Image (spheres, coloured by chain):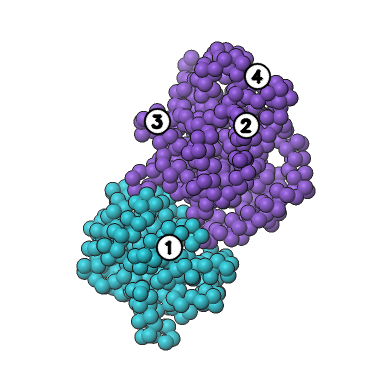
Chain colours: A cyan, B purple
Amino acid sequence: MSRVTDVIRAANASGRGVLVGYLPAGFPTVDECIEALVALAEGGADIIELGIPYSDPVMDGLVIQRATNTALESGFRVRDVFSIISAVTARVDVPILVMTYWNPVVQYGVERFARDLVDAGGVGLITPDLIPDEAAEWIRVSDALKLDRVFLAAPSSTDTRLRSAVENSRGFVYAVSTMGITGTREDLDSAARDLVARLRAVGAETVCVGVGISSAEHVRSVCDYADGAIVGSLLVTTLENDGPAGVRSIAAELSSGVSSVTP
Amino acid sequence: MSLRTESGPYFGEFGGRFVPESLIKALDELDAAYLAAKDDPIFQAELAELHRSYTGRPSILTEATRFASLAGGARIILKREDLNHTGSHKINNVLGQALIAKRLGKTRLIAETGAGQHGVATATAAALFGMECVVYMGEVDTERQALNVARMNLLGATVVPVTHGSRTLKDAINEAMRDWVTNVDNTHYLLGTVAGPHPFPVMVRDFHSIIGNEAREQLLATEGRLPTAVVACVGGGSNAIGIFHAFLDDDVRLIGYEAAGDGIDTPRHAATLERGRPGVLHGAKTYVLQNEDGQTIESHSISAGLDYPGVGPEHAWLRDSGRAEYLGITDAEAMTGLLQLSRTEGIIPAIETAHALAGALQLAQTMSPDDIILINLSGRGDKDMETAARYFGFLQGNR
């Protein structure tokens, strides 16, 4: 039904959570991005979150803003995301979710985007600025094409809104660990644990936690109560400094943290 | 059917709330607090008293006879929002939202600003109410509006220059939204225009609708009639919607003048409603200057306050329905308008406002002396002296 859900369930069954690794498409170039994504999967990421660079990324901190700006300045086009997915899925067996602000999809055409995503081998979308209330078209199209749909849940969300996020998501629900934007942090907010518990209470079966997760220790503590941990800015910084080889080794280190889920 | 009752979240297909989930609770709380305040006589009395004894409302009407004679057609009457405390219409919305923020128990105000008028107004309200204030301003704008940065500092606000993206108003809004996502517990984002997610477009419009309500009543009292046309400049569109709203159901032409920069057929302009197309920006579906991929295009205008690649969703709706018209005025035309009003009436307008003045002169030429054009004179030009002096070569005794 959902490859992402299957991957999470399989991991859970063998006593671990999943590592979801984020990298921006086309950073630093399309070719090097493909190498980095392959390295990310081979290093140990169970699911890839591939971000579409956008001119006005309000949910992102400086690290990701800089990287996506670089990609845009070197000529990244939205359609490049599909060739990247094709290239990566030809080499590694990993589900790829596309993370995108909503306007690029609106301009591409929601249905056309979804069809091209299916053709490329992508499995769904994570939508940081599209709430279920505004998502009627995307829900219809993704149902028809059996694509995953990851909505966000925040510590500030009411139970009614959490229920809506759970009911409308497929694959997993993205629990935002803290009130804030993406970026590495020293300490993880205890709010994440409460949020995951509240999501479970309204029926969530698969929940991954993101924003601010930047060490194997964080991954370990998150996988203690959630089904997976989402890491972004740390991977972007590593790619910037140490290239795909660095991404491979940091992914291996991070994935050592996923094994604390009690089956 | 009245066009004046639209109250969001949508105006036709425009508007909505395209923001991170983290902000939804704050937007819901704001919406509820605003709706309660709207019907609360105590709130309305408090705001009315601030308008009277702090802002200096009602603002007057001034007939610009010598200015109008340059066109030789219609009469031109100015609604003098430039005479408000802090020098522009921005204070109307700021005082309203600051009172709401106080009701919500927020202790910190953040704002974006382009020309600095909204930042100054927000810093003013923060000083008046004893609140902390942080203003985000594109680095480019902190340079071209240095005087307003100094004013905000003097009022006790912290001005944060935004150094990424196009370093103008659009990026200041992004940065303010990031701050809000992070500090939403104690912080109110005092958005300065009729853009953004619901309820901002409706709430900001309502706080500025006092402009048109007063002007309509004043004209009926002094002229015994409505104007032929009501005109204003449009960036995000707050002063325009403020004066348009009272006239939406009247047989009155409504014209918004956008910044055409070097010309709407060049790449350097901010004519969102003429050259943009529907998309999502800063939390709302509206017209956006964007490329094929939906990446926002950097706008250009000599006026920082109009240098914005989006526009309020209600304007997008008024444009598509044909109720209002939107036309471009170039940098050069606006600067001529600024000089002309200064020299015929002794009133120095903001460069933003000068776009409406230049547009009004073009319009007046097509009309007769029986016609009246009402212009929202949205701000005074003191802040623009450096830009104007450089533009006209008044520095170092050049002229």
Quarter holding residue A96: bottom left
* Chain ID at mark 3: B
Residue tagged by mark 4? B63
Residue tagged by mark 3? B264
Residue tagged by mark 2? B250
Quarter holding residue B375: top right
x, y percent for residue B210? 68, 36
| Kind of residue at disc 3 | Ile
**Left or right of B102 in this view: B21:** left
* Chain ID at mark 4: B
Specify few, some or many for label 1: CA neighbours under 10 Å numbering under 14, 14-19, or 20 or more: some
Tell if the residue under mark 1 belongs to the same chain as the one under mark 4: no
N-terminal of the pair, mark 4 or mark 2, is 4
Specify few, some or many for label 3: CA neighbours under 10 Å numbering under 14, 14-19, or 20 or more: many
Closer-to-camera residue (B85/A84): A84
Please, is residue B137 above or below residue A256 in the view?
A: above
* Chain ID at mark 2: B
**Left or right of A33 in this view: B265:** right
Is mark 1 in CB contact (under 8 Å) with mark 4?
A: no
Task: Look at 45% across and 42% down and name the residue there.
Answer: B287
Distance CA(mark 3)–CA(mark 4): 31 Å
